[in-house]
Image (cartoon, rainbow, N blue to C red):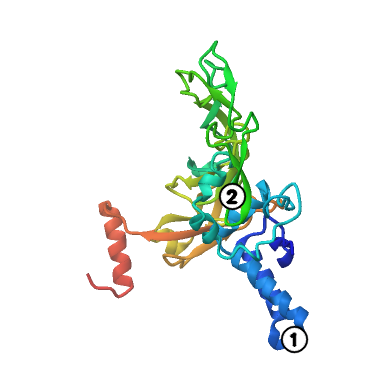
Amino acid sequence: MNKDYYKVLGVGEDASDAAVKLAYRKLAKKYHPDKNKGDSQAETRFKEIGEAFAVLSDAKKRQQYDTMRKYGCSAGPGGTRGGAQGMPFDFSQMGDFGDIFGSGGFSFDDLFGAQRDTREDRLEQLEIPFGIAAHGGAVQVNVSQEEDCRACHGTGARDGVGVSTCPQCHGSGMKSAPAGGFAFNRPCPLCCGRGSIIEQPCPVCHGGGTVNGERTVTVNVPAGTTDGQKIRIPGAGRGRKRAGDLYLQVKVQEDRFFRMDGYDVHCTVPINFAQAALGSHIRVRTLDGFVKLAIPPGTQSGTRFRVRGKGVARRNGTRGNQYISVQVTVPQRMTDEQQQALAQYARLAGMRH
């Protein structure tokens, strides 16, 4: 019986691990034998659900399963081809995946290595100023990429020297290989899936057909970007014909004044004893300039004030708030007049010094 594990669990091929687990729990609860005593169909369904979850919840097995669905396999000569071009596979007779890719004498790389999709995602770090993280903006990033070798125009052969058809696969790039009672279409081991043989490799790319290049891309950083957040640049990863994606993990440079917490920003402002005791108005820097903040008489050190709408912009157009903490400072130096005035205050307050 042909099975599609994604359909068994009712999830898409791009479903996350959490989505797979959630779907399994719901279905397992619904078809559990304890709740369906005497129902053979429910019991069969429960086993299928467990079988599907065992594969899709394991990263390695899921990758192998996805690759086999993509490239196809057959149950021996004359069998029905499965995978991307045909019906889903029946893995019920395959046992543990390790049995197929181990005891049969073939490894996963042997069967699919040369033909495997060369897409490869990359992860790099991007350090941005605090202002760009808060307001958003565009930054220029230099990214490396594979490009066709100019010396051989991407053929991999020395300029002026041709290539010949592979004598083993006759130009198809694929050969049939038995494994565990199944027949797999695998890349030709002689030409590595190219379908052709390079007589004299290019001295620049050494037969690879590509060289490392570099290009500059513009990255649009959204407002409110925080440390550890990832920005995806499609097609900027590795791969010749179909490049993967580049993920930039953001590192926000520290600011001497501001600290970002989600869509809110925080800062600390020093005030002197007189401003705290008598009250005052001070100018405080925000992301948009300066605002005037009223300090009530008797303000204590550590008191926090809120200025609405002076934080980071949200996608819906609203903004977070700015929180200002005041810190009462003690002067290190005072004039004689200031010392006398403070001493007079101490006497009036009944303080001894």
Residue 92 vertical position relative to residue 271 in the rendered view, above or below: below
**Residue shown at 76%/82% (left/top)?**
40
* Quarter that holds the C terminus: bottom left
Query: Percent x, y for residue 192?
Result: 54, 34
Q: Quadrant of residue 185?
A: top right
Residue identifier under label 1: 36
In the depicted view, which residue is nearer to us: 92 or 245?
92
Residue 184 vertical position relative to residue 174 in the rendered view, above or below: below
Query: Percent x, y for residue 271?
Result: 42, 56
Residue type, mark 2 in image: Pro
* Contact check, label 2 and label 1, Cβ < 8 Å: no
Residue 185 vertical position relative to residue 157 in the rendered view, above or below: below
- Foreground mark, 2 or 1? 2
Residue 117 visible (yes or no): no
Secondary structure type for disc 2: strand
**Residue shown at 52%/15% (left/top)?**
151
Q: Quadrant of residue 289?
A: top right
Residue identifier under label 2: 178
Q: Furthest-top residue in view?
A: 160
Residue 95 visible (yes or no): yes
Query: Percent x, y for residue 184?
Result: 62, 48
In the depicted view, which residue is nearer to us: 20 or 90?
90
* Quarter that holds the N terminus: bottom right
Residue type, mark 1 in image: Asn
Q: Does label 2 or label 1 sit earlier along the sequence?
A: 1
Q: Give the spatial CA distance, label 2 vs label 1.
A: 41 Å
Query: Percent x, y for residue 269?
Result: 44, 54
Q: Residues within 10 Å of mark 2 (few under 14, many from 20)?
A: some
Q: Which mark is residue 321?
A: none
